[in-house]
Amino acid sequence: MAMLEDFKRFAMKGSMIDLAVGVIIGAAFSKIVDSLVADIIMPPISLLIGGLDFSNYYIPLNHQAYALPLAEAKKAGAVFAYGNFLTVLLNFVILAFIIFQMVRLVSRVRARAAAQPEPAGPAEEILLLREIRDSLRK
């Protein structure tokens, strides 16, 4: 029972909930970045280097025919699928850069909030009026 209570306290901490929300949003955002890379960035790059589908670039390691699509080449034997790896690597770099920018922005906002002086409290006139009020009550 104690372990269950400890787990409940751990799971209900604010930071744990924030982490769960971050993971869910990150997964959804990852799909956006995947689409950006696969549908917007990689087609012009593959067009410049002479191919139509960058993720199908590979080096056959088992003497397969090089003209096969990647899926068929994998069925025929081992392949070095560098095009697919480069696509995934580009996804990671873009995602990491965007997350870095978001963390940087949050850090700046927190630094500005910490740099702003907190209100010093009530003005002198208010304090004086409170003293007068309190002395009149006595």
Image (tube, rainbow, N blue to C red):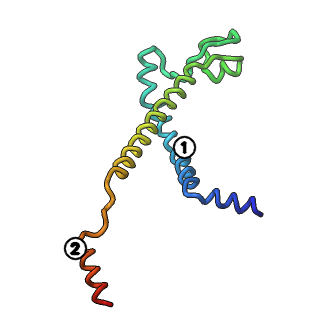
118 left or right of 51?
left
User: Is residue 23 found left or right of 97 in the rendered image?
Assistant: right
Quadrant of the drawing holding the C terminus: bottom left
Residue 104 numbered mark, or none: none
Instruction: Check the picture and name the quadrant holding the N terminus.
Output: bottom right
Q: Amino acid at mark 1?
A: Ala
Please give the name of the residue rendered at 55% of the width and 57% of the height, measured from the top-left corner.
14
* Relative horizontal placement of residue 46, taking residue 111 as reference (left or right): right
Q: Residue furthest left?
A: 125
Label 2: which secondary element? helix
106 is higher (above) or lower (below) than 50: below
Residue furthest right in the image: 1
Q: Nearer the viewer, mark 1 or mark 2?
A: 2
- Residue 125: mark in rendering: 2
Contact (Cβ within 8 Å) of mark 1 with mark 2: no
Vertical comparison of 57 with 94: above or below? above
Who's the residue at 35% across and 52% down the image? 113
Q: Where does the image place residue 72, in percent across and percent down from the top left?
A: 66, 21
The correct choice, above or below, for 67 with respect to 93 in the image is above
Q: Which residue is mark 1?
A: 27
Residue 81 image position (x, y, % from top left): 60, 19
* Precedes in sequence: disc 1 or disc 2: 1
Task: Indicate the secondary structure of the residue bearing disc 1.
Answer: helix
CA–CA distance between discs 1 and 2?
Answer: 55 Å
Left or right: 14, with 42 as reference point: right
Q: Amino acid at mark 2?
A: Glu
Nearer the observer, 69 or 17: 17
Q: Residues within 10 Å of mark 1 (few under 14, many from 20)?
A: few
- Residue 86 in percent (x, y) is at 53, 23
